[in-house]
Image (cartoon, coloured by chain):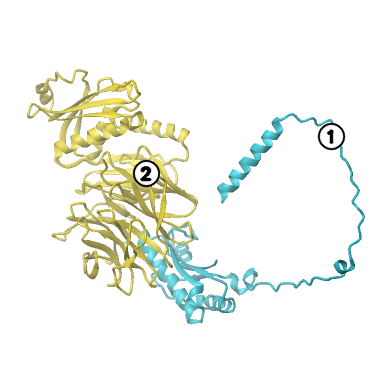
Chain colours: A cyan, B yellow
Amino acid sequence: MGNVKHLAFIISSAALLAACSSPVKVTEPAPVVESKPAETTAPAEQTRTVAPVETKSIDPLDDPKGVLANRSVYFDFDSYVVREDGKPVVENHAGYLTKNSNRQILVQGNTDERGGAEYNLALGQKRAEAVRKSLTALGVPEGQIEAVSLGKEKPKAEGHNEEAWAQNRRADIVYK
Amino acid sequence: MRTMKKLNTLILTAGVLASLSAHAQLRVEITGVGSNQIPVAVAAFGDESVSPTQISKIIKTDLERSGAFKIIDAGTIADTNNVDLAAWKAKGADALVVGTVQKGADGSFTVRYKLMSTVQNAKLSQLDQQAAPQFTRLAGHKIADDVYEKLTGVRGIFATRIAYVTQQGRSYRLEVADSDGENVQLALSSNEPIISPSWSPDGTKVAYVSFEQKKPVIYVQNLITRQRTVIANEKGSNSAPSWSPDGSRIALALSKSGNTQVYIANSTGGGIRRISNSSGIDTEPQFSADGQSIYFTSDRSGGPQIYRMSANGGDAQRVTFTGSYNISPRIASDGKSLAYISQRGGKFQLYVMDLASGQETRLSDNTNDQAPSFAPNGKYILYSTESGGRKALAVVSVDGRVKQRLTIQAGAIKEPTWGPFMK
């Protein structure tokens, strides 16, 4: 996508350069011919019809101060159980998803950096599955949720200490 | 000699950086020597200055890096047909490598080499190769392979390649390099992680896990044609691909049942079937050398341990028993030894196990080893480790005596995997 934009930029720049290289006389502007618009009268049935507009109610998902803005569930070391502090997060999103059956989510599980890439991927999956199960227990249909793992590959906190590791033992709810 | 070599490497690195700043130039450092070093004299090849690479230097560096040889510099021997072998025997050499390079009218090079035994006072081997300019390095590696095989009885791995992933910020690159870290070629670049590359047995394709779709998906990429095939994009995570020895199947791990389990797919795509059955994690499947068994990591007993089952599934036998965290099994091509990572005393370290006796040997003094893979001749293990806070690659001989470290100038290098023998 970035590349496409880049390419488009290069092409447009090239076009611009090409345009610049062809001789242009700036002192003699091209004559502007003003044409008068034809005077016409629209028929009454076209000017007297009103098309109604309804203001949209704000999607609570888009409210940066709303409860749905919190989309992360944290886990203890070597634990794959949703903690007490994660339960409201799961409940809030379960409420939204059951009311909005057209919305689908990815639950991305994560781990801290210690250990092998593939085993951590499987551990991250366990965290994602724990959140998925909590959501389905609250009535969210399976079809709206996909539990996946990023393992230790995409740490939110880059540090190599317990503080960073605690941030990375996490599952994120990502709306598709 | 040692300082000189380092300096050369530095100059080379700087030169390459100047021309190809995005490329990961590997720097190789060697420590330790083998137990029985064979003394070999290597002569500068006649007219080798016409070639873009100094063939005799590649041979010397390869043989030295293996730890199996003590290299004696033989100067230049232009007349390779009249060599005084007795004189070289007197200088302590068991064997002598001589050769010539000729530039052809079409721009290609003819590289001729002979291996002479001073002990038997006879020619042990010879090889004539025709090489395009960009393949003169390869010609040198093939000669080193022949010397290694004739003198040790084991097939050489200098002409094989490795694959690995580099990361600089959000830029991930899957690269392929010669076994000496030279001749780096980009296979895939992405803004999302790439893990678990695995070579096809013929060395023309690599299977890997890419996160470009916001989740792990398994691809097979043809290195020659660039063609990519999705091997598994099932609901959930798709990971840990590994080829069957005949190249027809790929073992992998899928989470579509709600827990990570081992499956097998056709290497051309499709045909996915489950072969492991536990209520926990089964992952990192690896075919045995004969293709009959699969080794894998499972937490069925609590922490992760290595197990073995039939490639058709069924009951599994536990293989590792020491420590509470044993992962990433890799089997040597002779089927006799298992390399893996074990966490003991807070350190993740490379171990090798003799499967017949169950005897374990620790091969690393580092603290954060990952992703081991055997050289195709079974004599070396490539793995990722940490060095001075940075991710680096390391190679160790299976007897633990010879060690190499491969580092890059900037960023991380990880997920290495040693490629197969190639034609």
Quarter of the picture holding the C terminus of chain B: top left
Question: Disc 2 sits on a residue from what chain?
Answer: B
| Image quadrant where residue B208 sits | bottom left
Q: Residue B13: which quarter of the image? A: top left
Q: Residues within 10 Å of mark 2 (few under 14, many from 20)?
A: many
Check disc 2 and report the residue beneath it: B176
Are the numbered discs 2 and 1 placed on the same chain, yes or no? Answer: no
Residue B144 badge = none
Chain bearing tag 1 is A
From the viewer's perspective, tell me whether residue A139 is left or right of residue B237.
right
Of residues A68 and B92, which is closer to you in this image?
A68
Residue sitting at 17 percent across and 38 percent down? B149
Q: Residue A119, percent across and down?
A: 35, 63
Q: Residues within 10 Å of mark 1 (few under 14, many from 20)?
A: few
Quick one: SS at disc 1? loop
Total marks placed: 2
User: Residue reaching furthest left?
Assistant: B120
Q: From mark 2 to mark 1, how far is it between C-alphas?
A: 59 Å
A83 or B201: nearer the eye? B201
Please determine whether, in this image, residue B381 is positioned above or below residue B211. above
Residue B266: x, y in percent? Answer: 32, 59
Name the residue tied to disc 1: A29
Let me know if residue B344 appears in the view.
Answer: no
* Residues marked 2 and 1 touching at CB (< 8 Å): no
Q: Residue B84's quadrant in the figure? A: top left
Q: Secondary structure at mark 2?
A: strand
Task: Please tell me which residue is depicted at 22% across the width and 37% down the height of the picture.
Answer: B145
Pair 2/1: label in front: 1
Q: Amino acid type of disc 1? A: Pro
What's the amino acid at mark 2?
Val
Q: At 28% from the left edge and 67% from the top edge, which residue is drawn?
A: B324
